Image (cartoon, grey):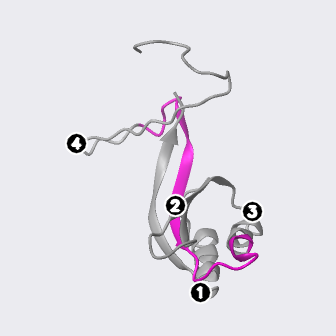
């Protein structure tokens, strides 16, 4: 730690990613292990009122908690965005694939980036 307590607000949090050339996963038995997340990227076919609501509803009625929704410009035209979504659950055989299938049925493009453990420090 170079300097402590540099935050503006007590509730600020900083996220770090551990990257290694060696394939040595952190222990799932660690007291810092918090659970598993799955990250997907969703591209809407067109922007219209309620489009994002339809996407989020596929997760909501399956009771899949979302911990992050980030919009990024798609660079395919003015007003076109894609969404990076973190799901607070490991990739399973039913719920997440079902949500992805429903979102694709809406005409969206979905890319699964991966499922991974996460830790709190």
Q: Residue at x 67, y 73 (%)?
A: 55
Front position in the image: 35 or 82: 82
Quarter the N terminus occupies: top left
Span shown in magenta: 27-53
Q: Residue furthest left?
A: 21
Mark number displayed over residue 22? 4
Q: Residue at x 52, y 61 (%)?
A: 72
| Earlier-in-chain disc, 2 versus 4 | 4
Judging from the image, what secondary structure is the residue with disc 1 in? loop
| Earlier-in-chain disc, 1 versus 3 | 3
| Earlier-in-chain disc, 1 versus 4 | 4
Judging from the image, what secondary structure is the residue with disc 2 in? strand
Judging from the image, what secondary structure is the residue with disc 4 in? loop
- Pointer 1 residue: 107
Q: Residue at x 49, y 76 (%)?
A: 77
From this view, report whether residue 90 is shown above or below residue 52.
Answer: above
Q: Position of residue 88 (x, y in %)?
A: 62, 53
Horizontal placement of 64 versus 26: left or right?
Answer: right
| Earlier-in-chain disc, 4 versus 3 | 4
- Pointer 2 residue: 72
Front position in the image: 8 or 115: 8
């Amino acid at each position: 730690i170079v300097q402590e307590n540099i935050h503006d607000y007590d509730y600020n949090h900083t996220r770090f990613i551990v990257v290694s050339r060696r394939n040595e996963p952190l222990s799932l038995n660690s007291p810092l292990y918090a659970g598993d997340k799955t990250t997907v990227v969703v591209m809407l076919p067109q922007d219209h009122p309620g489009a994002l609501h339809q996407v989020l509803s596929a997760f909501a009625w399956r009771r899949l908690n979302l911990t992050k929704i980030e919009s990024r410009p798609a660079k395919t035209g003015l007003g076109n965005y894609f969404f990076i979504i973190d799901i607070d659950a490991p990739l399973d055989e039913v719920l997440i694939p079902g949500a992805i299938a429903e979102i694709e049925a809406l005409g969206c493009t979905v890319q699964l980036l991966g499922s991974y453990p996460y830790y709190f420090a």
